[in-house]
Image (spheres, helix red, strand yellow):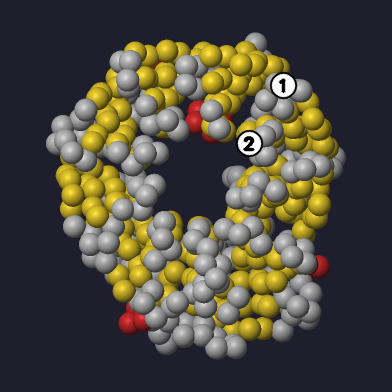
Amino acid sequence: GINAEYGEMSHQGINLSETFKLTKSQCCFSPNGKYIANASQYRLVVREFETLQIVSVLTCIDSVDKVQWSPNNKLILTSCFKRGVTQLWSLLETKAISKLDEGSSGLVDVVWCPDSKQVLSWSEFGVRINVWSLNHKRVSYIQNPKLNSGGCKFYGSRAIVCERRERDDYISVFSFSNWKLLCNFKVATEDLESIHIIRDAIMVCDTRFKPSYLVYSFDGDCLSKVDLYSNMLGIKHVSQSISEQFAALGCYDGTCKLLNSVTWSVLKEWKHTAEAITKNTVIYKEEASTNGSRFQVVENQGFQLPFVKAHHDDPYLLVGVGITKFSASGRYLASRSDAVPTAVWIWDLDDLGLCTLIVHQAPVVALDWDSTLSKDKDETLAMSCNGDHVYVWNVGGVLALKVPNCETLNGAGELGPIRNIAWSCNGKCLILKGDYHFCLCYFPCYNGS
């Protein structure tokens, strides 16, 4: 358990499933949380979540690059990019119910449409989007898309697609039921970097060399244009709260800016420096222990942050705020400054201050909030540092969970270093992903309070 100073737990305090083979980190829960599907080379394996019993083993055309459940939980797609082929599967069938072949145009990305009746696939070099209708057995095209699936967002009954034509950026708004074009407008950007749909509007971020964002209505009216600062790189990462009331902009200047989606103005700016630490901030610092790791609460005053210098090979990598994530209720925001990669900053939106700073021994590579909300359970953040530990935080403290069978400096385990993590839909466990294997991690002695 945890106390006022330390949080540590060995593998005796957690339950782990057996380790399963994994290809290209392709492992995901069904939207209803009943099943978990993973790629294992050219096989798709589907298990019941509660029992981990195998429901189906499906043989794909080649090694799988992407796995995705349909929104209605009934179908799964698997894609092999080098073959340009996507296959669609039903749990009731042992053979693919449909095969989508891109031919010579190539394949770089694919997603389900929200109606589960259509699939969108992106050809190489941004030539076109193929819209595959499963009901009508036909394909239609959208020319000159930009940013692959990152440039296509769904909101209500609409699909918003970024396009690039004659060195200018455009946005097209479609009704995805019949792909009727509702609106097409030119965007005042030099090189559109990303789009985000927030509260019935389209937020557009310009190139990283231009620190500004624009907001458009679905009719193409420019609602707002904001220049954040000058003579520096721009926006690196954007996330939004589930309520869509706020958006967080991780910027190359080392700040995280809290955006009010009603006025589209910056409500608060947080610096990832010692200036953000107040007398109310709790600082946890990871230390080595005989059983693995533990966290100790350290003094706020005079605390030295472990900054790192940008590498000459990639000067953008260790500059700016590269991760921002809101908790399920929207009360907390977790961020990581790439200039201090071992630290996770947790901001409390109730008082707009830094409530917790968690400093690890190694750079943080992944973090994920438990998406379930309950009166009997505090909001919980899980973190991993590409090693043999998983870290869990809530307002009561921090747990360092040592995971057996991980690769360490002293030897190799089957799971390997933990590259990524994700909470299950019901918040009962975490998926721990290594390079070639994954397992599920349960917390029987940790009730979230």
Left or right of 219 on screen, residue 85 = left
Q: Of the residues shown, which amino acid type is indicated by label 2? A: Ile
To which residue does mark 2 refer? 197
Q: Residue at x 60, y 50 (%)?
A: 242
Mark 2 vs mark 1: which is more N-terminal? 2
In the figure, is residue 64 to the left or right of 117? left
Q: Residue at x 30, y 38 (%)?
A: 74
**Tag 1: residue type?**
Gly
Question: Disc number at residue 220?
Answer: 1
The answer to whether one can see residue 385 in this image is: no
Vertical side of 301 occupied by 353: above or below:
above
Secondary structure state at the residue bearing disc 1: loop
Would residue 373 be found to the left or right of residue 45 on screen? right
Residue 36 lies, with reference to residue 60, above or below; the image says: below
In the rendered image, which quarter is residue 116 located in? top left
How far apart marks 2 and 1 lie (CA) works out to 13 Å
Q: Residue at the spot x=39%, y=25% of the render? A: 118
Residue 216: percent from the left, percent from the top? Answer: 73, 28
> x and y percent of residue 408 in the render?
37, 69
